[in-house]
Amino acid sequence: MDKPLKYTFSFIAERFEKILIIILCVQLPLLILHSFITNYIYAITPNVGTIYSVADIYYALFTILFFLYAQIPFVKYTFNEFEGREDSLKNALYTFLVQGFPIFVFSCLISLFIVIGFGLFVIPGVIILSLFITAPIISIIDNKSVWKSIKEARLLFKKHFIKIILLITLWGVFEMGVGIVFNSLTLNITSSYAAVAGVQIVTNMLFYPLFIVLLTTNTMKWREGLRKLT
């Protein structure tokens, strides 16, 4: 896997139908739930006139939480296909159900620290996210506790921290830029909140699987290099 980016696009293109099943069965329901929860929080949280409100903190918290949690079936399916395993899609969805809760708990805790980090001039939040983002991937690949995967995630971060931070930052900026363009085009047509929210959901459905597959393939490549050094 010398070219993870090329591999990612070919992987998605060749297996689009099965990736779409994961999107519809896992990612879309979580996106709808995220939209419902955050909209409710904004509705009941008073606006005190500051740049950022308590609702914005909760929005960031739930966004990071769902970002970490929703990756489970995508990671498992990517790894299963790389290994050539049978029933890879079925196993990926099963893994989401079986390993989902421990990773959900892990995501809740890490999301809290990341949000605090983002509140401290953004950079600490990016570093914390970069430090722990590969732990769930290692956990899913090795079928072990996510807490036991933190040590190797730290080793990967220590060796590839620039690559990990750049990958997260560049992809985040790219997706945000595309989202802004799509939202602007939508608002030129209609001011309906439902339309804007729908565009945001569709944008996430398009780019999130690409990022997770790319991160998974890179993680597998980095782990191979780490093993060669030990």
Image (cartoon, helix red, strand yellow):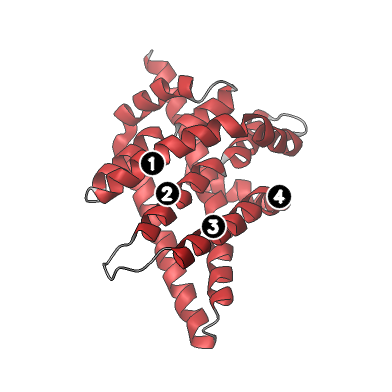
Tell me how far mark 2 sits from mark 3, CA to CA: 11 Å
The amino acid type of the residue labelled 2 equals: Leu
Q: Quadrant of residue 92?
A: top right
Pointer 4: what residue?
A: 25
Pointer 1: what residue?
A: 112
Pointer 3: what residue?
A: 37
Q: Write the residue at 64% across / 56% down.
A: 28
Neighbours of disc 3 within 10 Å: few (<14), some (14-19), many (20+): some
Earlier in the chain: of badge 1 and badge 3, it is 3
The amino acid type of the residue labelled 4 equals: Cys
Pointer 2: what residue?
A: 61
Tell me how far mark 3 sits from mark 4, CA to CA: 19 Å
Q: Quadrant of the C terminus?
A: top left
Query: Of helix, strand and loop, which one carries label 1?
Result: helix
The amino acid type of the residue labelled 3 equals: Ile
Question: Is residue 3 shown to the viewer in this render?
Answer: no
The amino acid type of the residue labelled 1 equals: Leu
Of the residues tagged 2 and 3, which is closer to the observer?
A: 3
Q: Are marks 1 and 2 in contact (CB under 8 Å)?
A: yes
Question: Is residue 214 shown to the viewer in this render?
Answer: yes
Tell me how far mark 4 sits from mark 1, CA to CA: 26 Å
